[in-house]
Amino acid sequence: MKLLRFGDRGAERPGLLDADGRIRDLSGVIEDIDGAVLSPSSLARLAELDPSKLPLVEGDPRLGPCVGNIGKFLCIGLNFTDHAAETGATPPSEPIMFTKATSAVSGPNDPIIRPRGSTKLDWEVELALVIGSPISYADVETARSAIAGYCICNDVSEREFQLERGGSWDKGKGCDSFGPIGPWLVTADEVGNPGNLDMWLEVNGTRYQDGTSANMIFDCAAIVSYVSQFMSLQSGDVITTGTPAGVGMGLNPPRFLVPGDVVELGIAGLGVQRQVVVDCD
């Protein structure tokens, strides 16, 4: 299934994408696409629905973040061999963890807001996973079965804030609009193997990232297992898993985003995002 949320910011309704690419309204069945409906049993009940009998959503509504009420928004850094190489970093021996503020979460096509004082605004196409079953101290197989599904995340980053302002990555990762997720949450059974998905990102029509999740150092199940050793994970938590080569700071010369730039990105089977960069009010 491809699950989604549509409508105005803060008033999104749950939906799913039918086989013809049309949005069907799930609000008569569930309240939201969030942790409460992402357990295996809840997803199984949704899978039994006949989409043709659900109300058809007319027009072209705004798509919200594909998961609502996110409890934790966790990230893994330098998790692709080619991205580690372009930054000059030694590939990590353990996953590098940091967090994004949940206030950074935005819809897949909402604007990227360049924060005040920003000079090095950057992009990162990433495969994100969403937890369906609560776990703690999980082995790899238990961790794999705890993943409800996958979606695209643009791990928008302000590199000066991240790397030059006191050593904390979080301050360059959690600004408003720095976490677009969606357009859909694709359930794990439909994705199959998340370890060989084509990933790409373009700015103003120029392709900068053209990679594959096969270059991950730590795969999705290993990441979930690892993170669960340090904190419990709840249904609806989101973990984004790193980016392939081609980020702006890795180019020669570096290329950073400015207002008016159009960022488009996609992952095979998970859809496409499109954002326009705007200045902070």
Image (cartoon, grey):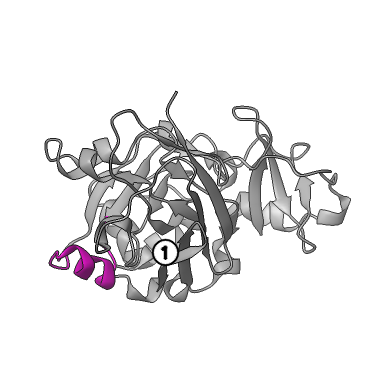
Location of the C terminus (image quadrant): top left
Q: Position of residue 24 (x, y in %)?
A: 78, 48
**Which residue is outermost to the top?**
281
Asked if the stretch drawn in magenta spans residue 87, the answer is: yes
Number of other residues with Cα within 10 Å of mark 1, as a class: few under 14, some 14 to 19, many 20 or more:
some
Q: In the displayed structure, does residue 233 sit left or right of residue 23?
A: left
Residue placed under numbered mark 1 in the picture: 144
User: In this view of the protein, can residue 137 be seen by the observer?
Assistant: no
Q: Is residue 208 visible?
A: yes
In the image shown, does 172 or 264 lie closer to the viewer?
A: 264
Q: Is residue 276 magenta?
A: no
Quadrant that contains the N terminus? bottom right
Q: How many marks?
A: 1
Extent of the magenta region: 77-93
Percent coordinates x, y for residue 188 in the rendering:
54, 63
- Residue reaching furthest to the right: 53
Image point 45% across, 40% down: which residue? 259
Secondary structure type for disc 1: helix
The image quadrant that residue 11 belongs to is top right
Q: Nearer the viewer, residue 161 or 215?
A: 161
Q: Is residue 243 above or below residue 7?
A: below
73 above or below 215? above
Q: Position of residue 53 (x, y in %)?
A: 88, 51
Which residue is pictured at 81% across the width and 55% down the height? Answer: 51
* Three-letter code for the amino acid on which mark 1 is drawn: Arg
Report the side of 253 relative to 101 (left or right). left
